[in-house]
Amino acid sequence: MIHEPARLAILVELSFVEEADFVYLMRRTGLTKGNLSSHLSRLEEAGYVQVSKGFVGRIRRRSSP
């Protein structure tokens, strides 16, 4: 599951914080929206991350604790 460099990068970034939003992870990993979303979905299915979806004002946000 973690053999993919992008997934490892996501998990490394998350190891430094309690929670991170989608934009933060996108900037820190350099992944595109679609690529990051795909990898987060796979990591969530495997139980490595938990993704919560919500809004900040009118902007939809996803975070991964």
Image: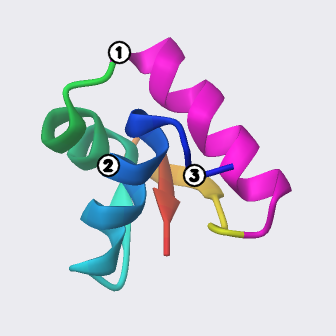
Residue at 73%, 56% in the rendered image: 44
Q: In which quarter of the image is residue 20?
A: bottom left
Q: In which quarter of the image is residue 28?
A: top left
Looking at the image, is 26 positioned above or below residue 53?
Answer: above
Amino acid at circle 1: Thr
Main SS of the magenta part reads helix
Question: In screen coordinates, is 30 left or right of 44?
Answer: left
Q: Which residue lies furthest to the bottom in this view?
A: 18
- Report the mark closest to the observer, 2 or 3: 3
Task: Classify 10 Å Cα crowding around label 3: few (below 14), some (14-19), many (20 and above).
Answer: few
Looking at the image, is 27 positioned above or below residue 31?
Answer: below
Q: What numbered label is drawn on residue 2?
A: 3
Q: Magenta stretch: give its range.
A: 32-47
Q: Mark 1 points at which residue?
A: 32
Question: In screen coordinates, is 52 left or right of 35?
Answer: right
Q: Earlier in the sequence, mark 1 or mark 2?
A: 2
Question: In screen coordinates, is 48 left or right of 14?
Answer: right
Q: Where is residue 58 in the image (x, y as percent from the top left)?
A: 42, 37
Q: Earlier in the sequence, mark 2 or mark 3?
A: 3
Can residue 51 be seen here? yes
